[in-house]
Image (cartoon, rainbow, N blue to C red):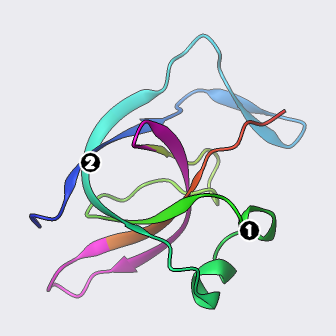
């Protein structure tokens, strides 16, 4: 485990349903929470990073998150939420680096926006 990694809380919705094409959590069931060890770095704003973010979200506050833990991203039913500095960040893009030297997953996380 890297000494650069710190503990972060992850929220995972486990119950809900699709309503009008959007995932709606069950309001009576709180999300599961668990802790991961991860390192966080600011997004560089490079063209490659921006291409991995949905076009309408490219101005959102975001980070790169590195961890050994496989998490759910926005491409799945309900993305995991990582709490960074007291704010909720949704997992978007991910890459897997499993070369048996320093295995890890790399995620792009964006500040979760309220859905109206």
Question: Residue 55, image x and y in percent?
Answer: 79, 71
Sequence order check: which comes first, mark 1 or mark 2? 2
- Quarter of the rendering containing residue 45: bottom right
Judged left or right of residue 82, residue 15 is: right
Q: Quadrant of the C terminus?
A: top right
Q: Residue at x 63, y 56 (%)?
A: 74
Q: Residue at x 39, y 42 (%)?
A: 85
Judged left or right of residue 13, residue 17 is: right
45 lies above or below 38: below
Start-end of magenta stretch: 83-104
Q: Residue at x 37, y 31 (%)?
A: 33
Q: Circle 1 sits in a helix, a strand or a loop, which is it?
A: loop
Question: Residue 40, image x and y in percent?
Answer: 34, 62
Question: Residue 58, image x and y in percent?
Answer: 71, 68
Q: Name the one closer to the observer, 76 or 53.
A: 53
Instruction: Report the residue that reaches farthest toward the right.
Output: 20
C-alpha span from label 1 to label 2 = 25 Å
Asked whether 93 falls inside the magenta stretch, the response is: yes
**Residue 36, numbered circle:** 2
Q: Quadrant of the N terminus?
A: bottom left
Q: Name the one closer to the observer, 16 or 30.
A: 30
Q: Circle 2 sits in a helix, a strand or a loop, which is it?
A: strand
Asked whether 82 falls inside the magenta stretch, the response is: no
73 lies above or below 25: below
Question: Residue 12, image x and y in percent?
Answer: 47, 37
Task: Mark 1: give few (<14), some (14-19) or many (20+) Cα within 10 Å.
Answer: few
Task: Mark 2: give few (<14), some (14-19) or many (20+) Cα within 10 Å.
Answer: some
* Residue for badge 1: 54
């Amino acid at each position: 485990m890297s000494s650069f990694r710190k503990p972060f809380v992850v929220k995972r919705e486990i119950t809900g349903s699709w309503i009008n094409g959007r995932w709606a959590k069950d309001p009576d069931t709180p999300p599961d929470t668990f802790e991961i060890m991860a390192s966080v770095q600011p997004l560089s704003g490079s063209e490659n990073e921006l291409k991995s973010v949905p076009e309408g979200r490219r101005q959102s506050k975001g980070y790169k998150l590195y961890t050994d833990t496989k998490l759910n991203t926005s491409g799945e039913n309900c993305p995991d939420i990582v709490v960074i500095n007291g704010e909720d960040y949704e997992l978007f893009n991910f890459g897997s680096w499993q070369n048996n030297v320093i295995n890890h997953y790399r995620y792009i996380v964006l500040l979760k926006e309220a859905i109206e």
